[in-house]
Image (tube, helix red, strand yellow):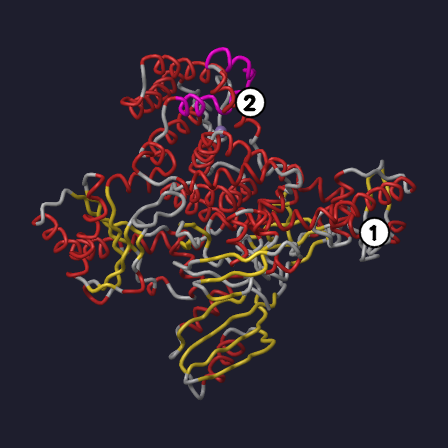
Amino acid sequence: METTSPIDLQKERKLILKEYRNLLRGLRNNMTAAERKQIRLAFEMAVDAHKEMRRKSGEPYIIHPLRVAQIVVNEMGLGATAAICALLHDVVEDTELTLDDIKREFGIKVMKIIDGLTKVSGVFDLTSSIQAENFKKLLLTLADDVRVILIKIADRLHNMRTMDSMPRKKQLKIASETLYLYAPLAHRLGFYAIKSELEDLGMKYTESEAYKDIAKRLAETKRERSRYMNEFMKPIRERLEKDGFHFEMYGRPKSIYSIYNKIKNKGVSFDEVYDLFAIRVIIDTPFDHEKADCWRVYSTVTELYHPNPDRLRDWISSPKSNGYESLHTTVMGPKGRWVEVQIRTKRMDEIAEKGFAAHWKYKEGSNDKALDTWLREIRELLRNPEFNALEFMDDFRLNLFNKEIYVFTPKGELKIIPQGATALDFAFEIHTAVGYHCIGAKVNHRLVPLSHRLSNGDQVEIITSKKQKPNEDWLNFLVTSRARSKVKNALKEEKRAIAAEGRIILEKKLKSHKAELFDRNLQLLMEFYHQPTSLELCYRIGTKDIALKELKDFGVDQGKLIPPSKDKQKPVDLAKLEKLATSNAELLIFDNALDDIKYSLAKCCNPIVGDDVFGFITINEGIKIHKTSCPNATEMMSKYGYRIVRTRWTQHKDIAFLTGVKVTGLDDVGLVNKVTNIISGEMRLNMQSLLMDAKDGVFEGTIKVFVKNTDELDKLMNKLRTMKGVISVTRLETT
Ligand code: MN
């Protein structure tokens, strides 16, 4: 916000010192006198280096590194070294200080972490190939010193907390990246509180309406809920006190993001999400009594309230691979409502909240083999010269959120693998060579095929043959990123030779067109021929599947290819569009001034006037307009940020959009009539089609109708909702 009064420097200095003291307070039991000096030095260096800089909000820049350091210390439980690095995390990139300066003052370790932080800055910037390289760097630093990634997550968290004064386009991009990568990473590293906050903040920007709506409803029902929770907890509290437990117990609302996902995935309304909160019981007990005491609490709770046998989760006997330990049960509370109860010790709670760092702290006492294994696997994957970062990024990301199951080797050794993993995944888990030559498996002494999905508690014996080798089919059922990338790499070996030949052919042909074989052109041809990777493109050229005949239709400008247009009247001016994306300009839909820019509405989400939208530059079809809540939006924005165009609707245009509405309700004879009456009669809308399907007394109707904007659509949907017998009314994404 602009302010006309001069900046009160005195006041700012006070604020900065206050933040600094807050940081020291968090570290007080956790630092030596020497470290205290170093922190002071880091603080002074950062203040000096950033002294001319301000954030978009107008506050002094130094507040940012101070807050990041506080997150690292207070919310992640890291120590002095991490705090020093957090204070200095932006100086090498944004100021005149160099890595040598850092090394001189703080030594090699701090220098290396800062170097890592600087290298992975802007992981998703520019083109996708640079992005992939950056992702590889990010993983390398992760495997090198986990603190780099932890500080990166803290940096992201503070940026997300303070994003209000950013331009909308940036907010969307940052929020999407956060949901795409940072929240899953935080989850994988065991920072549950941070993961939930990142998700909530991400949703606040990508789906602001839904976010505000749920936040409002949560606030409205807060009193009623806390009354209910107290009533629920009272008898448990009395019993645990009588039994002499030292404990803490409180109710926690579920995150907005998780409530929203439940509503979306299960197609229920807010009122129908019954488990809006969980009760947590944290007991204080010595390490060797932990397990027995947690189960004692469990039996107390389930004596008072009846448990749902399907909802017992015992992560104490077998902790999750990110270190999470806890006992979860869902019981029937008063008034017939299900309540989730989480039982854990103080030690387990600290691990659950502070993840990785707390995990190291308690290293002796707990099983962190799984985490070590994970980091070792990443290192191993990265060492592979065939590693394709972009491809791996997707597999890796999916794996971050996987649920886990526990299976055993014939010798009784426990292995943690993702839910849904197959016998073949397990073979790769044992050894790459075992995977390559696997022909089948025995699960609990029964012969099964490679694609057999394993279940919790299975005992698995792998059968191999020297003659076996990886084939393309395997990728249809393999689940773990480790196995998938091993197989892909093996398959690529033979492809690679052919692709190398193809590349030479391509280079020759481009030369004869006065065009060059650089990244942009390669990208363009990949999209033109619908090839997902450059390897694939060159491979198909090598096999003569792609004969490059179309190359003669391309224009060339200073070595750059210009794609031929499918639409002869209005050729797509790619250079102009790319400029639009980088200039931060705004595209106004249905504005005459922009008549020469080709755009269309995306079919995957069917935006209509009033929806929150953005433009996405495509090679052949100009700009496509998507809803920010489009299922593909997160991926587009985080992977191809450089192609996003800020977009807004111009108002007052009499254009109608085809959109779809789904209505379910109890079957009623006159219903079709009543629905058409509302649409054509009362609201005077044009209906394109109405499909009604009734089964077992429940009908499901799909209505396709033309509306002017979201207001009109909302009005229609609200009208339909008030009809007798109607259970739910939802908008259809596709028509
Ligand atoms: Mn920063």
Q: Determine which residue is flagged by label 1.
A: 564
Task: Give residue 457's quadrant in the image.
Answer: bottom left
Question: Where does residue 78 sit, x and y in percent of width and height?
Answer: 37, 29
**365 lies above or below 43:** below
Q: Which residue is mark 2?
A: 94
Identify the magenta region. 81-106
Q: Secondary structure at mark 1?
A: loop
Nearer the observer, 589 or 629: 629
The majority secondary structure of the magenta stretch comes to helix
Residue 91 belongs to the span the image colors magenta: yes
Q: Is residue 143 left or right of residue 271?
A: right
**Horizontal and vertical percent for residue 148?**
48, 30
Q: Residue at x 92, y 41 (%)?
A: 512
Pick the residue in front: 40 or 542: 542
- Which of 101 and 432 lies nearest the eye of the viewer? 432
Q: Which amino acid type is marked by label 2?
A: Asp
The kind of secondary structure element at disc 2 is: helix
